[in-house]
Amino acid sequence: MYESERDNLIDELTTQGITDVFVIKAIHDVPREKFVPEALQHQAYKNIALPIGKGQTISQPLTVAIMTQALEVKKDMKILEIGTGSGYQAAILYAMEAKVFTIERDFDLYQEAKQRFEEMGLNIACMCGDGSIGWNEFQPYDGIIVTAASPVVPNSLLKQLAIGGRLVIPVGSRITQILHIVHREDEENYSTIKIPAFQFVPLIGLNGWKEE
Ligand code: SAM
């Protein structure tokens, strides 16, 4: 279903600079319409964010592609996602054969995503809680992707990154952010590449923003 819409979206992403063939294949293969409310399914392959309830959104496909490409995902890598939302980003990582762990703070969204993973046969570990402190039990991670806007790069997440791993996180105000791609060089040293300008919903939690 939606074959021509999918192809058009892939054309748009490649035109906009997405080159990782595994990212492109995952976005082509994962049915985004299954992650959005039924009434919005006809818009699933538009390159736009869409509401998923509880004041939250499924990110724009270009944003998903940029962030996933920045993570440099390889088969069997252990990846932690913070901000499960609909579960779409986690499903993209799973399609790239990563071992995926994802945390959502909103219980209803967590339950919906968990059920979706089960129905779709996706073996993704999910938890309801504050992802701004990470998920200590399964660290270190080869990649950590935060799909909500943080005021800072949380130290807790840097510490849970494997040496050689990458943390991809939008950092800035509640309104607009710069994407930070942090590479853990060794035990002590991290290097960062920054890409402007993104707009995410806030990361609410101990190392994020306070609930308003
Ligand atoms: N990755 C999602 C997807 O593919 O649909 C989109 C994420 S949405 C832009 C951001 C999500 O982060 C929301 O569902 C929100 O409830 C969640 N969130 C915000 N703060 C969080 C926190 N501290 N821990 C876990 N999830 C959080």
Image (cartoon, rainbow, N blue to C red):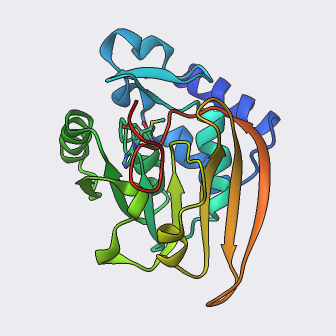
Instruction: Decide: is 46 above or below 14.
Output: above
Can I make out residue 2 in this image? no
Q: Residue at x 26, y 35 (%)?
A: 109
Left or right for 26, reference 171: left
Q: Position of residue 210 (x, y in %)?
A: 42, 41
Q: Position of residue 72 (x, y in %)?
A: 64, 65
How many numbered circles does the render carry? 0
Can I make out residue 50 in this image? yes
Q: Residue at x 55, y 39 (%)?
A: 28
Instruction: Decide: is 113 above or below 181.
Output: above
Q: Locate the N terminus by quadrant.
A: top left
The image quarter containing residue 206 is bottom left
Q: Locate the C terminus by quadrant.
A: top left
Q: Position of residue 35 (x, y in %)?
A: 36, 30
Ligand 1 located in image quadrant: top left
The image quarter containing residue 31 is top left
Is 174 in front, or is 111?
174
Residue reaching furthest bottom?
A: 187
Left or right for 144, reference 182: left
Q: Position of residue 11 (x, y in %)?
A: 73, 31
Residue reaching furthest top?
A: 39
Is 100 in front, or is 7?
100
Q: Residue at x 58, y 34 (%)?
A: 174
Left or right for 42, reference 63: left
Instruction: Decide: is 179 above or below 190.
Output: above
Q: Residue at x 63, y 29 (%)?
A: 175
